[in-house]
Structure formats: structure tokens, C-alpha cells
Amino acid sequence: MGIAGRIAVFVGLMLSQAAFALPPEHETRRLMLAVEQAIDEQRWEDAAGFINRLQTLDAGKPLAYQFYRGRVMLNAGQLNEARAALESYVTNAGSQAPHYREALKLITNIDRRTAQTSGGTDEGPGDEPVAVIEPTGNDRIERLKTLYLVGSPVAALEKHLNSLLELNAWRRGNQRVVKANEPPDIAYRVFAREEGTLNVQERRRTRTDGRAEVVSDEFAVYGVGRQVSWDCPGSERACWLYDPRDGSRWMKLADRPDAVEEIAETLGDLIRQLQSP
């Protein structure tokens, strides 16, 4: 094919993409149908891709989104993320929802699998971190690259970390009762920079008018420890990640020890990848 032919094909593709661009609310419905069909047909890689695209859309998502997200994460072996998504669906959708009973059964299945694989975590009194997470091996990172359909370990870890942070953001009151589309009181997002830096954004919702205050903290990871400590003091109904730079309290998260352990593990892996030449 000559240059003119290649240009014609390129222009045709661009026009085709523009012609089929949908507003976010309609694209959300389209992707929901696509992920439902992919799961029914056991096309899990396609389903994961649709879930990832849904997550990036700036539009309200139907309640079933968390159910399908939970199923995709469970199939990928991401038990903490799967449980958080399914619990969100059960809490918000209610007992009359079409997938309510199946979601409860899946949560029970997750509990059984977690009990079989858990080595246990010792938690003690006081304000000192009670757990230190060492970075994990490459097998887990390869699974995350497949799950999030990316080729870079840094991109896979960043996406997984932010997904976990979203599902385990801190809220006042009952941590298990989360109203649909209601933002958390404290939430975090982490952005990995190519030059070996991390940018951590903290968003706090004020109690007076509900507006969000955003604070950004960017730092180079070179020289930063790869071990990330955490604990969940019972009296506070919250878990904490400790800053690997100086050991001080850093991220306030929901009181879900298993999920926070995975967050610490993923953050440690991300730091290690950014420190690699």
C-alpha cells in the first residue's frame, strides 16, 4: 500500500472513531452491556478491559458496576479488591437487587479463600506500626499487567494502587455503609513520574460545606525505603500507612486490615520499580 493509501486508511479510522464517540452516560451503558456479555462468555481479559475503561469515565455508574468489578477482580485473584467492590454493591443495591444473592455467595467464597491463604498478621497495642511489608516478586506484577492491560510494571502497580485506595478511602461513621456516588471524607491518588518521583494527592471533604480540599505532595523515591509499614489501631476505626521517608503517619484509610496490607505491599513494589535503573 502506498503513502496515499495509508493516509486514506488513517483518515478513515479517525473519522470512524469520531463518528462513534458517545457522551459519557451513553458510553457507560455501552460498556456495562459489554462487560456483562464478556463475563457471561468467560472472556475475562475483555471484561477487565471494559472495567478499566468504565473506571476512567467521568460519569455516574450504575450499581451493577461494582458487582461486575468484583467478579473481574475475583477471577484475577485480587481478593481484597473483589470483596470491597461486592460489599459496596450489596450495601447500596439492597436485598432486592438482581445480583444480591450471588454477591453474598461470592463474598463467602472470598472469605473461604482468604482463610486458606492467609498467614495471619500480628497486631499489637500502641502507636508503633505493627506490620512491615516487603516488596513482592515478579509473578504478581505480571498478573497485574494482564489484569490492567498495560505493558509497564509501573503503570500496572499505579493502577492497582489507585483502585485499592479508591475502594478503601476513609469515611466517617460506619465504614461498611457507603452511599452510592457519595465521595469519601479522605481519599488519595498516587501518580508515578518517569523521572523517579511519586506525586500523592490527598483530597479532604470539609464537614461544613462538603467542599474538597486537595493537597499534593511530590517527592523523589531514590533513597526512600522500600518497606511500607501500616497498622489499624482498634480505638480509631481507621488504618494508617506510614511514610517510608520518615516513619510518620501518612495515609488514613478505612478500617480494613487485609486491604491496607495489600496497599502497603503495592506501594512498596511501586517504589522498588521506580528505583530500578
Image (tube, rainbow, N blue to C red):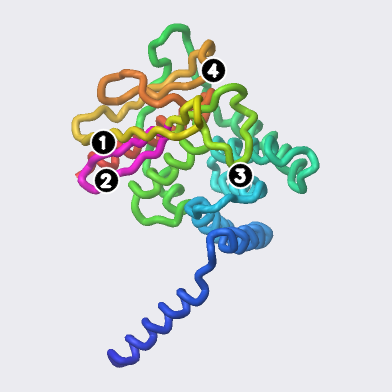
Q: Which residue in the protein does label 1 denote?
A: 218
Q: Which residue in the protein does label 2 denote?
A: 193
Q: Measured along the vertical axis of the image, is residue 42 above or below residue 178? A: below
In this rendering, position of residue 153 left or right of residue 196:
right
Q: CA distance from mark 4 to mark 3?
A: 24 Å
Q: Nearer the viewer, mark 1 or mark 2?
A: 1
Which badge, 4 or 1, comes first in the chain's sequence? 1
Q: CA distance from mark 4 to mark 1?
A: 28 Å
Q: CA distance from mark 2 to mark 4?
A: 33 Å
| Magenta-span inclusion, residue 266 | no
Which badge, 1 or 2, comes first in the chain's sequence? 2
Name the amino acid type tagged 1. Answer: Glu
For label 1, the SS is: strand
Specify the segment rendered in magenta: 188-203
Evaluate if marks 4 and 3 touch, with contact meaning CB atoms under 8 Å apart.
no
Q: CA distance from mark 3 to mark 2?
A: 29 Å
Q: Tag on residue 184?
A: none
For label 4, the SS is: loop
For label 3, the SS is: helix
Q: Which residue in the protein does label 3 denote?
A: 70
How busy is the neighbourhood of tag 4: few (under 14 within 10 Å), some, or many (20 plus)? some
Of 261 and 98, nearer the camera is 98
Q: Which residue in the protein does label 4 denote?
A: 237
| Image quadrant occupied by the N terminus | bottom left
Task: Where is residue 56? Give x, y as percent.
Answer: 47, 53
Q: Magenta-highlighted stretch: main secondary structure?
A: strand
Is residue 256 at least partly visible in the picture?
A: no
Question: In which image quadrant can residue 90 be found?
Answer: top right
Q: Measured along the vertical axis of the image, is residue 145 above or below residue 91? A: below
Q: Nearer the viewer, mark 4 or mark 3?
A: 4
